Image (tube, rainbow, N blue to C red):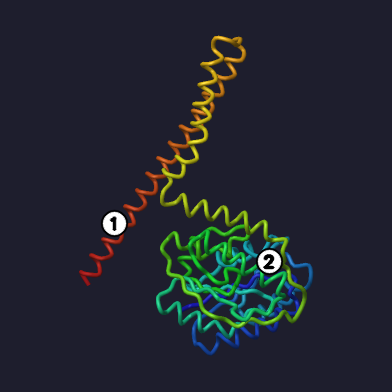
Amino acid sequence: MDLSIVVPLYNEEESVKPLYDAITHAVTPLGIAYEILFVDDGSKDKTFETAKSIAREDKRLRVIKFRRNYGQTPAMAAGIDKAKNEIIITMDGDLQNDPSDIPLFLDKIEEGYDIVVGWRHKRQDKLITRKIPSKIANWIIGKVTGVPIKDNGCSLKAYKADVIKSVPLYSEMHRFIPAMASLAGSNVAEIKVKHHARKFGVSKYGLSRIYKVLLDLLTIKTIVSFTSRPMLWFSILAIPFLLLSAITLLIFVLMFFSEGIGSLVIMASLIIIFTASGFFLIMGGALGELIYKTGDMKVHELALLTIKDIKNQ
């Protein structure tokens, strides 16, 4: 089992060396091949210089640098994209996640799970600004996505590389990876992990991210709902346009004998616009249904071929 450890960093110069030491101390005794990827997310301090100096001494450490600050998810996505090994573990760079938990994740992956999520059951953060909003957000995310994860915000997660590399990551999407991966039928497990209070620097996260999370949650809900039943949902979206078209047509008929030609032209144009919008939405749903069914048939055929191969062995 080869391992890649991806760590986004932003203004964490004091944490870089202790974090590197903790990771190597936890992973080296396992006797597996591994690499560490530190992704500097446009830090303004000496984070990159510190990481680069360590990388000169240890070729297992690779450092990626962003020209400016893009955010945790893009930094994490860049590290995942550059990771070379079959198992990928992500974690925060502020020493609040504990690398000594890494063997627990690998054990779960070996049990057959595709994704293993950390649960900070004794979270060392402020109650009002971090713990309570997190509990509310996790409850809402579980209800909306149908994937009941207790701690979506925990960055300490393990993935099979072929699963995570197929999941699109942007904005704050890293917290929705279990929900996104569930579309492909991935097996997800959750384990308790240690969590430490921040030792150096200040937290980069707060209540200001709530609106981004809500927008991303709306996106995820749309994707999850539309994926398996595109015709149904596009038809529902088409209903308001078709109703507006019918109402406008009725008004057009009533105005035909009492209004001038100018008003009738406007009404006729609205009828055409509303009808065309509804029609195109329905056709879009039909196209989505065709694409989904075609992909589903290919997956079914692949499964049958796999079963035949197993029987022939």
Residue 65: which numbered mark, if any? Answer: 2
Instruction: Count neighbours of disc 2 (C-alpha within 10 A) and say few if under 14, some if 14 to 19, many if 20 or more.
Output: some
Q: Residue at x 26, y 61 (%)?
A: 305
Choose the circle earlier in sequence order: 2 or 1: 2
Secondary structure under badge 1? helix
Instruction: Tell me residue 130's x, y (percent).
Output: 69, 71
Q: Residue furthest right?
A: 45
Secondary structure under badge 2? strand
Residue 12: which numbered mark, if any? Answer: none
Q: Residue at x 41, y 63 (%)?
A: 185
Q: Report the front residue among 21 and 130.
A: 130
Q: Residue furthest bottom?
A: 29
Instruction: Tell me residue 225's x, y (percent).
Output: 47, 52
| Mark 2 vs mark 1: in front | 1
Q: Quadrant of residue 14?
A: bottom right
Instruction: Count neighbours of disc 1 (C-alpha within 10 A) and say few if under 14, some if 14 to 19, many if 20 or more.
Output: few
Instruction: Tell me residue 239's x, y (percent).
Output: 48, 36
Which residue is labeled 1 in the image? 301
- Residue kind at label 2, given as amino acid type: Lys
Q: CA distance from mark 2 to mark 1?
A: 43 Å
Instruction: Tell me residue 123's x, y (percent).
Output: 64, 79
Q: Residue furthest left?
A: 312
